[in-house]
Image: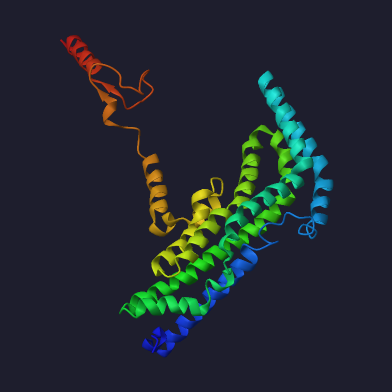
Amino acid sequence: MSFNIISFLSPLGSFLLSAEIASSAGLWQLIITYGLGQPYAFPYSSSDLTIITPLFKHITNELAIPIALSAIFLSSIKIMMTRKGEDLNRIFWRMSLGILLFFLSLDISKYILEFSYLVFNSVWAYGSINWMSVMTSSEIMSYLSNMASGGNTLSALLLSSGYFAATFILLSFLMLRDALIIVFIILLPIVSLLMVVTELYERMLQLWVMFIELSLIPFPIAIALYLSSIYSDVFFMHLAFLWAACLIPSIFMTKGGLFRNLMSLDILSGVSLLGNRMQVVTDRIPNVRLGNFSIGGEQSGNIGGNNPYHFNINDLMKKDVEYRRTME
């Protein structure tokens, strides 16, 4: 007779466990269908972009000229204020790059997404895995039952929530990614024109980098999910690779501070909050260090007497001797 973990639970516990397992399996199907499936994850073909094309053309046609003129005007004001020839050269090259990216942004975005899909599919199609059947309710129940059959019923119950949490976090990121991909495709032409402004160049360039990272991030996620599938007989490794897929955005995305803050373990451990608080505390402490109290000369970093809390012992002794002489 096969072991069934539900038989060891109360009716309420059995209901909660069954609901959690069913939810995890349902979220997994959404991940495969919408989070990593075509055309939602990689909308690079003309038919995939048909829905957003009218909005894209409207925004670029209506806003391109005023934004371009504003960018040129602000850059001209900057040049007049600085009066440096090197700024003029930089403005020229940034203006040329911005105009070029404006006209080619849609094609460049499509090529980036098409290349990303080819890289992603090289792993996703490897081994002819039926991804829908990798994590079904029966499969999850089988993992937990095999673990609980060794007497670890409580541990199995605690770890069952890991499936739900992992699938929920991964689906949340992938759906947000799909939405951001569409938003970036529409906004990148305008972003490109704003690159001519010196103060905005770095930020606009970061948006292009973030778009590329969002396009490529399914590739390492696919590797982690593939490893999770081939370790399906080892419960801990199977769940560990599933969680690795959830944490990949916080590790690989250099410009996506949003994903690092939402998905990083630093928030769960409180390290990030503590570090921010310590920075505020140290900012309120005067710049007094042991190195400020020197004998026989200035310390490094305090040359010139810029530190008001620096005391030179030799100067104090000379002043004391002179004071005593005047008093005599």
Image quarter for residue 232? bottom left
Q: State the image coordinates of residue 251 (x, y, percent, origin top left).
A: 49, 50
Q: State the image coordinates of residue 178 (x, y, percent, origin top left).
A: 65, 59
Image quarter for residue 27? bottom right
Q: Is residue 85 above or below residue 217?
A: above
- The answer to which of 41 and 255 lies nearer the viewer is 41
Look at 20% across and 10% down and name the residue there. Answer: 326
Q: Is residue 188 above or below residue 129?
A: above
Does the image show residue 74?
no
Image quarter for residue 5? bottom left
- The answer to which of 289 and 324 lies nearer the viewer is 289
Q: Is residue 86 left or right of residue 67?
A: left
For the C terminus, the image quarter is top left
For the N terminus, the image quarter is bottom left
Q: State the image coordinates of residue 34 (x, y, percent, origin top left).
A: 65, 66
Q: Is residue 152 left or right of residue 96?
A: left
Q: Which color scheme did the rendering employ for the protein? A: rainbow
Which residue reaches farthest left? 328
Look at 60% across and 48% down and name the residue there. Answer: 213
Q: Is residue 109 left or right of residue 267?
A: right
Does the image show residue 154?
yes
How many callouts does the rendering have?
A: 0
Look at 64% across and 48% down and name the residue there. Answer: 211
- The answer to which of 45 and 252 lies nearer the viewer is 45
Q: State the image coordinates of residue 86 (x, y, percent, origin top left).
A: 66, 21
